[in-house]
Image (cartoon, rainbow, N blue to C red):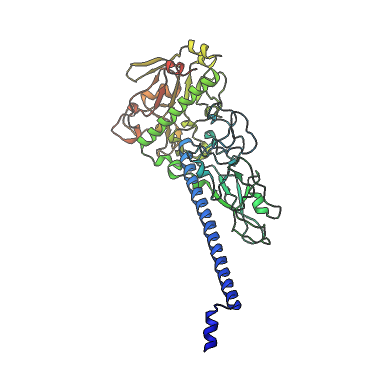
Amino acid sequence: MAHDTKRSSQGFTLAEMAIVVLLVGILLTFGVGLVQSQLENSAINVTKKRQEAIRDALIGYLGKYHRLPCPESAITPPPAPNVSFDGIEDRAGGTAGTPPVPNPATQCVVTFGTLPFVTLGLSREMALDGWNNFFTYQVSNTPYDWTRSASFNTGNQGGIVVNDRPNISLVPYPIPAVVVLVSHGKNGAGAFTIKGTRNTLPIAADIDQLDNTSNDGVFVRRELTNSDTAPGGTFDDIVAVFLPSDLVTTTVQNKSTLSFDEQVSQANKDIENIQLALIGYVIRNNRLPFADSNNDGLEDSGAFTGNIPWQTLGVAANDPWAISSPPAAVAVANRYRYRVTPALTATTSKADFITQVGNIVVNDGTGTILTSTAPFVVYSRGRNNVAFFNNGAGNGAPCTAAAPSTPLAPVAPNCLGTNEINNFAGNAPFVKAAMNLPPFFTTNFPPTAGYDDIVEFVAKGAIDARLP
């Protein structure tokens, strides 16, 4: 008993101390591992939430501009006036300044780079993944260029190939993507950094991660793995894939679901953007563009009446009612239209432009002249420009003549109201009248009185005042 008391007073034996140290070490190892696991899960969660927020920003941008932004061309200095890592999309041309202003009508400098967070209205933090590296952003430009309004149609498909590796071989997703957004994960291999540099690319054995760093329009999205022996190598990339159905919302996909008033509002917004683009064109080129007479969206020398040159200007090509036509038809009858004063397409300097006067006449449909000196007119022929009512022989045919004077259901092509005739022909005087219900909405309404055109012009002085 005395011996036991003495042993107790001397404390733990060496063997007992060793056991204690071993247990503490095991607990610390588990604790550190747990902390590391929590940090890694937190970074993954942050990354995925930001990818979702970016998707929402892309949807909003597409709905507003009918195009997606170009990437920033990381590392390699892009052509002036573009600047790397300023958060603004990089396009050919543009206006120099701080910040530079991209030209929406031109092509992207690259289709693979970093996210243009400023263009999307996001903070720089939202363009970084959970490990503080920039997301890599690729947008489809073939077979349809999603970065140009002139090319946008709700039936467009993506062109980016995304593969999975469920077993040994790569298996492509059945639908090509429009946008791919890549976080290069914890190891950050190949990621663009906040210092304006690029991390070392993945090793050759990690072929799937390497595929996500090359500008070849092919990506891999698969399960994460730390195994060096896994097919395709280790993989810690977090890849968000956006298909056409992910970005084209119901409202964008089918504007005909909007009420008539909402469609008119959309057309007014489009025409306002077109007018601003025309003024911007004068500022850059000292003249107004010609009209598009070949239906390719490009201005055609000598054409003073025709489609708005949407590709030249980088604006919407079709009014809201064009969606009622099949995508293959591209709703030619519902192009935004344009009439320009000939003399204002030939000026060679801003001073020369200011000395010229517009000559286009617009009245209100009652004989009152609103202007006789408009430099240009931008207009939509309205909803009833295409007879989409069911009448057998004429369904979907463009209107080309006046409606009958009696209140009968109009038969295409005779479905224009009296005040719409000149607008359809594109000959002055244009008529900017009060909106009336389209004639096919009621049998108690004389079709000749129907008016749903949207006609707008800008005073010449308003343009002159904007010239530097």
- Residue sitting at x 49%, y 46%: 55
- Estimate the x, y position of residue 37 in percent, counting from the top left: 54, 60
Q: Is residue 184 above or below residue 21?
A: above
Tell me if residue 273 can be seen: yes
Front position in the image: 389 or 297: 297
Q: Residue furthest right?
A: 204
- Residue sitting at x 54%, y 45%: 128
Front position in the image: 349 or 189: 189
Tell me if residue 177 can be seen: no
Q: Residue furthest top?
A: 355
- Residue sitting at x 53%, y 86%: 4
- Residue sitting at x 45%, y 33%: 319
- Estimate the x, y position of residue 391 in percent, counting from the top left: 40, 38
Front position in the image: 408 or 247: 247
Q: Residue furthest bottom?
A: 1
- On the rendered structure, is 34 left or right of 377? right
- Estimate the x, y position of residue 432 in percent, counting from the top left: 37, 22
- Estimate the x, y position of residue 275 in percent, counting from the top left: 45, 25
Name the quadrant containing residue 205: bottom right
